Each structure stands twice: as structure tokens, then as C-alpha cells.
Amino acid sequence: MKTILHTVLLALLLAACTPTPEAPVKNPAQPDIYPDYADVCIPSNIAPLNFLLRDEVEAVEARAECGGEALVVNARGNEVCFDEEEWQEFLEKAVGKSVQVTVTTLKDGQWTSWHPFTWKVSEDPIDPWLTYRLIEPDYEIYQNLSLRERCLENFDERPISDYGLVGNRCMNCHTYANQNPNLSMLYVRGEGGGAILNRDGKLSKLNIKTEEMASGSVYFAFSPSGRYVVFSTNDIIPAFHAKPEKRLEVFDKTSDVFVADLQTMTILHSPLLADSAVFETFPAFAPDGKSIFFCSAPPGGLQQMRYSLCRIAFDEQTGRMGESVDTLMGPSPTSDDKCSVCHPRVSPDGRRIIYTVAHYGTFPIWHTETDLQMMNLTTGEVDRMEVANSDKSDTYHSWSSNSRWLVFASKRDDGLYGKPYFCHIDKDGKVEKPFVLPQRNPKFYDNCLKSFNIPELGRGPLPFQAIDVKHAVEGPQENFTFTKQSNTINKERNRL
């Protein structure tokens, strides 16, 4: 009892000693805060946007105000950390409104009131769960790699697969079927590994490879029904640049696209997606299941490898692919243009597709020029998403289930470590300024030596644990058989 009483008295004493602003001098500039949460659009179900002042100040007050309600933090030092319960109550009342945030700092005995910034609280909620791979941004080796699940409404995080539990193997990132936590997959590489399929928390190991394929599945995505998985097989070659401003290049020696039928345990093949004269990769289903988007390029020198955005019809009833390939966007004849397309992802409402563009190649994460672009699938109009992009790599993106939020990995801070950023996209396609995943400790990213790889949004928590993945890897595997579809290949391909 004495210990509890002493703790309470100490907290009250510290609160009483926290100075409050007196006669502040106004500064017309906004405060230099990190992370940059100034003038962003946020969902009402996001965790507190805790931040710090880059200047070493003696004390700080942050006052968030909206509609007569106020959320205030007074603290010694340069960190602003909101109470989680108070934050949630405040945002619930601010939905659809703008919050004005005023920061006042104490330095050398003088208080300074900085120009306010705003938080626009969207009426569109975000899917409250996020998965990602934590990995060192290294070139040849990896260690202590893990796949993680984070609740966006608070700071809870847990491993869903761990390097040490799966025989120190590398792991591909986790992918949901239509943001559904009860149907998802991850891939454990190496001998004895395989695709780990989650169906309502029951895990099974799939060997999605036959002797007709160059490799196992690399990039994959589910069909809307969940019956099919479209995937690429890539013979990947890493190489170092001779130029000091370049780091690492990764390119495909061969690559094809196939479809796995999870009901019949067969691999579906079309020569239009496994053309020896073309590299096909990065497949994704349309949300209505009637087409498959992918990227393709003819073989050539590394800097001549420019991938086009393509589409082929698909019938979910029969598993049959179309008789021709449509090219939605092809390379520009200007070599300096960002004209190589990767990672197409269609919004769940089917209206838009977002992809990355780089000067060349198939591994844009190490290309500083990599940007996101968005195409309206009805009009063909392209938005360069300048509000969301930075001067570093912006890639590896996924949609929320309501098509209103995008999460992507950005290296905008230092060009080395990728972090998950979120941006709002309204019903008319307007893109808002992105903000980084909030952390309890505002210094988290300054001290984090891991990259967040391929963030994916989910509608609920995953129904399995990291130990379940270990047991699945150690268990028996389910094999597939190979089937072929006859097509007359359209060598010219249809240009839209």
C-alpha cells in the first residue's frame, strides 16, 4: 500500500512541477517536429500521434482543439505523448472535422508559441491491423528476421512468424486475401519450407512448385473468392553497382506467372503468362476476379529492362485465362523517364490501380527515384501522386478494404530504412499528405535499425501464433499437379 501511495504522490508532484506557458512569444513558423505529423489527414481509429521537438527544449505544451473540446499535454523535455484513452475519446468527437494543434515550447527561460498545424480527422476508418516484415536493409545476409502484426488503434505488436522458430530461414511477407485475416499466406524459404496457408487459423504447408516451373512462388495474390492464388516464379539474381551512388540491383533471369487452384490442388498455366520471350511478374487479381494484372518486359540489358503494366482476362468459374494480353501502360521512348512499372495493386472498389515507377528494372526498393502512381481504370488518367511521394524510394503498397487508405513503405527519412506511411485517398481520387505509423516512444524511429517491408492492411487480428507457423513448417506438405491451357499467343499484344 505504501508503494502505491508513494507512486501516486510522485506522479502528482511531477505533474505539479511541469511548467505551463507564461507570456509566450509568437513565432510565425511551424514547430520542427518528428515524425512530421503537421497538416495530415488521419483516421479516427489511429493510435496517438506522439511526436518530439527536434530542438532540445526545457518543456513543451501541445494543445489540440476542435469544436470546444481540447486535448492538452504538458511535459518536461521535448517529447509529446498523449494519453491513449483521452486521445481515442477526443478523436471520436472530431470525426469529419479539423483539429488545430498549437505547440508552445520553453527554452532559455522563454516560452515560444509556434504557428498551429492541423489534423483533418477523416470519416473513413482504416483497417485496424497491419502486418509487415522487420529486416535489416542489408545486401547478402539477414538475421533476427520476423513477420509482425500491429494493431493500428493502439501500440500492441506481436510476431506472427519468427526467424528462430523456422530454422533460421528467410521468410517472404504475409499477404491477406482481400484484407481477410481468416485467409492469408506467407512463404518460408529454403529446404523444408513452403507456402504457409492460413484458413481460419488452421495452417497448412503447400509446395506451390512443379518440375515445369523455374522456382517456387515469389510474388502472389488471392482471387476474390479465395479459391485461386496467382503467383510469379522468379529466378532472381542480385548484383552490386560499380557506381558509389548506387547500392544493389536485383533482376530476374527468368520469370513467369501461374495460378494455383487451392480447391483442386492444380497449377494452371497459360502460354500468355509464361512466354519464354517475355518476363512476367508482380501479378494481382482485380477485385471482381475477372482479370489479372501483371508486369512484363522483353529480355535485355539491365538498364533496358522496362516493365509494362498488363492485364489478362480470368474466369473464376472455370479457372481459364484470356486469349490475349492488354497493355495498359508501356515504356516511354525517353530513357530518362520513370517508365518501368512494378507492384500493381487494384483498389477493392475496382476504380483505381496503384503501382510504382522507376527508370528501369524490377527491384525498385533500392532506386531512389521510385515513385507511386495511380491510374483511373475507367478513364486511363494517371495521377503522379506528388503529394505522397518523396525524393527517396516509395513502394510496396496495399489498400484498405474501403479503398480510402493506402499504406506503403518509404525511405524518405534517410534513404536506407523503410517505414510504413499512410495516406488518405478520397472518393474522387484526391491524395492527402502521408504520415508514418505512430509509435509509443517518439524516438522509436531514431533508434530502430530495421526496415518495415511490404506492409499489408487487415480487417482483424490473425488467428494464429508464431509457434503455429513453426509446427506447419515441420509438418507434411501438400503438392500440386500441373495443367496446361492452350492459347494462341498474341505477339503484338493489345495496347490500350
Image: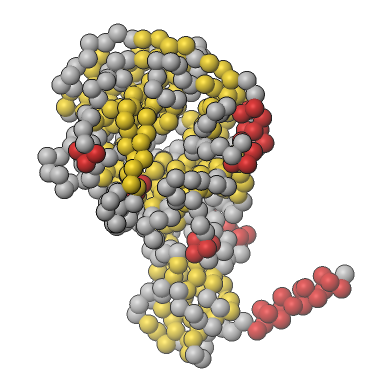
Q: Quadrant of residue 28?
A: bottom left
**Residue farthest along the front direction in this orientation:** 242
Nearer to me, 357 or 300: 300
Nearer to me, 223 or 120: 223
Q: Position of residue 199 (x, y in %)?
A: 58, 26
- Answer left or right for 344 relative to 264: left
Q: Quadrant of residue 162?
A: top right
Q: Position of residue 62 (x, y in %)?
A: 51, 73
Instruction: Decide if residue 283 is in sight here.
Output: no
Establish if 249 lies above or below 378. Answer: below
Instruction: Decide if residue 478 is in sight here.
Output: yes
**Residue farthest along the right direction in this orientation:** 1
Establish if 435 lies above or below 117. Answer: above
- Answer left or right for 6 relative to 395: right
- Answer left or right for 344 relative to 49: left
Nearer to me, 397 or 480: 480
Q: Position of residue 225 (x, y in %)?
A: 46, 22
Q: Residue at x 57, y 57 (%)?
A: 88
Q: Residue at x 12, y 44 (%)?
A: 334
Establish if 224 lies above or below 125. Answer: above
Q: Residue at x 52, y 21 (%)?
A: 207
Q: Position of residue 289 (x, y in %)?
A: 38, 23
Q: How is the image coloured?
A: secondary structure
Q: Quadrant of residue 75?
A: bottom right
Count all numbered tags in the image, as a single digit: 0
Quadrant for the N terminus, please.
bottom right
Quadrant for the C terminus, please.
top left
Q: Residue at x 42, y 47 (%)?
A: 139
